[in-house]
């Protein structure tokens, strides 16, 4: 029995591996659950875990630069629509994402996958010239946030960290930045501060239309495996992929059981309505795994990465994953 370490956040589609409901043949897992803000620092800088949740933006960047400790399998642990994450300060003159050209905009990390997608949306959907934006990076509303991998940016491109002890929310409220690209709503917005507003108020309808038109449900995180392990055991990548696929099936079945049960077991009043809207808009395979079904979306991410001065070269989607899972 091979002993390997595994680290992810506590996604319902990952927990069956942590609680041993799903196992990998011939492998005994030592698992850790931790927030991805901490996990990705350890994965990108130290390659600490044998199997790890990984930012796909960071994985593309590292593959583009040369040999990397990890290869990946197309089990996409995190996906999220991103039109909901554009925020501006009231009175800034920013009325829609199209108005962000020439502005100073905050983002927790320039390389984060949410930012990769949101900048891509600004360019593709709203016609924004990204080269005109000045970027500020740092913690959204509490704590400290730094780039997990050193950036290599062209001369003249402005990506500056906030000062020690400051947050992007503070800069937005003080008028030192005009807008935010945020993976979650700022705390002040959630508390009802009217000085911060969403630039896409009807985001659910806009995101649904975006999915109908593009077929994309933006991929955020992927499952990565230490490359040396699959060199020694080429079948391991497929076994890991199969295990995460089984865990996702269990999570979706559980969701449907909760939805169809005689009593609502989750503390959410419109859970059933949300599930029904999702299935109607995206079908049964709404949280898709596998390479073939997601190749075009991953290729778009690779294009975004090089255009946004993250990747050192244009990476092919096939370069990101172990060859044994390309037929999934």
Image: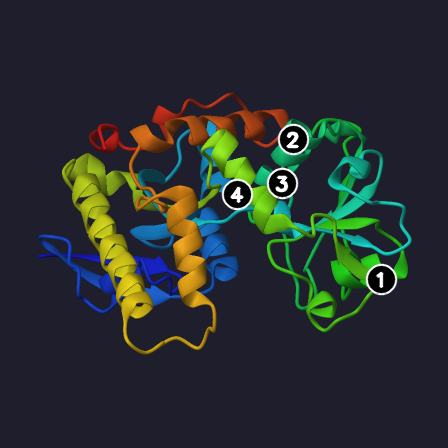
Residue mark closest to the camera, 1 vs 2: 2
Q: Which residue is mark 3?
A: 118
Residue mark closest to the camera, 1 vs 4: 4
- State the SS at label 4: helix
- State the SS at label 1: helix
Q: Which residue is mark 2?
A: 125
Residue mark closest to the camera, 4 vs 3: 4
The dot on residue 208 is 4
Q: CA distance from mark 3 to mark 1?
A: 21 Å
Mark 1 or mark 4, which has the lower sequence index?
1
The reply to whether the C-beta atoms of the residues labelled 4 and 2 are less than 8 Å apart is no
Mark 3 or mark 1, which has the lower sequence index?
3
The dot on residue 173 is 1
The reply to whether the C-beta atoms of the residues labelled 1 and 4 are less than 8 Å apart is no
The quarter of the image holding the C terminus is: top left
Residue at position x 45%, y 38% in the image: 59
Q: Is residue 27 left or right of residue 78?
A: left
Q: Where 318 sits versus 134, above or below?
A: above
Alpha-carbon neighbours of circle 4 within 10 Å: few (<14), some, or many (≥20)?
some
The quarter of the image holding the N terminus is: bottom left
Q: Is residue 302 left or right of residue 18?
A: right
Front residue of this view, candidates 19 and 266: 266
Q: CA distance from mark 4 to mark 3?
A: 16 Å
Residue at position x 43%, y 44% in the image: 281
Residue at position x 74%, y 69% in the image: 188
Mark 3 or mark 2, which has the lower sequence index?
3
Can you see residue 111? no
Alpha-carbon neighbours of circle 1 within 10 Å: few (<14), some, or many (≥20)?
some
């Amino acid at each position: 029995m091979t002993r390997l370490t595994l680290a992810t956040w506590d996604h319902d589609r990952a927990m069956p591996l942590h609680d041993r409901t799903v196992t990998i043949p011939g492998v005994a897992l030592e698992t850790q659950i931790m927030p991805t803000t901490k996990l990705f620092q350890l994965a990108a800088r130290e390659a600490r875990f044998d199997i790890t949740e990984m930012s796909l933006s960071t994985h593309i960047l590292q593959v583009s630069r040369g040999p990397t400790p990890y290869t990946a399998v197309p089990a996409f642990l995190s996906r999220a629509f991103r039109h909901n994450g554009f925020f501006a300060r009231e009175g800034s003159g920013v009325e829609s994402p199209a108005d962000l050209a020439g502005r100073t905009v905050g983002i927790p990390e320039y390389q984060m996958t949410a930012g990769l997608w949101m900048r891509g949306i600004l360019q593709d959907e709203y016609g924004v010239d990204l080269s005109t934006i000045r970027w500020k990076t740092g913690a959204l509303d509490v704590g400290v946030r730094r780039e997990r991998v050193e950036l290599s940016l062209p001369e003249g491109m402005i990506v500056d960290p906030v000062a020690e002890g400051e947050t992007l929310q503070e800069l937005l409220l003080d008028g030192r930045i005009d807008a935010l690209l945020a993976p979650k709503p700022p705390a002040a917005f959630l508390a009802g501060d009217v000085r911060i507003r969403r630039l896409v108020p009807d985001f659910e309808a806009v995101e649904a239309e975006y999915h109908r038109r593009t077929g994309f449900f933006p991929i955020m995180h992927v499952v990565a495996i230490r490359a040396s392990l699959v060199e020694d055991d080429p079948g391991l990548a497929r076994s890991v992929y199969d295990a995460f696929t089984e865990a996702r099936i269990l999570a979706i079945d559980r969701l449907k059981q909760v939805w169809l049960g005689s009593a609502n077991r989750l503390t959410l009043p419109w859970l059933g309505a949300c599930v029904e809207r999702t299935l109607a808009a995206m079908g049964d395979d709404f949280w898709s795994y596998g390479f073939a079904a997601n190749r075009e979306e991953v290729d778009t991410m690779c294009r975004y990465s090089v255009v946004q001065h993250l990747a050192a070269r244009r990476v092919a989607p096939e370069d990101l994953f172990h060859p044994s899972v390309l037929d999934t």
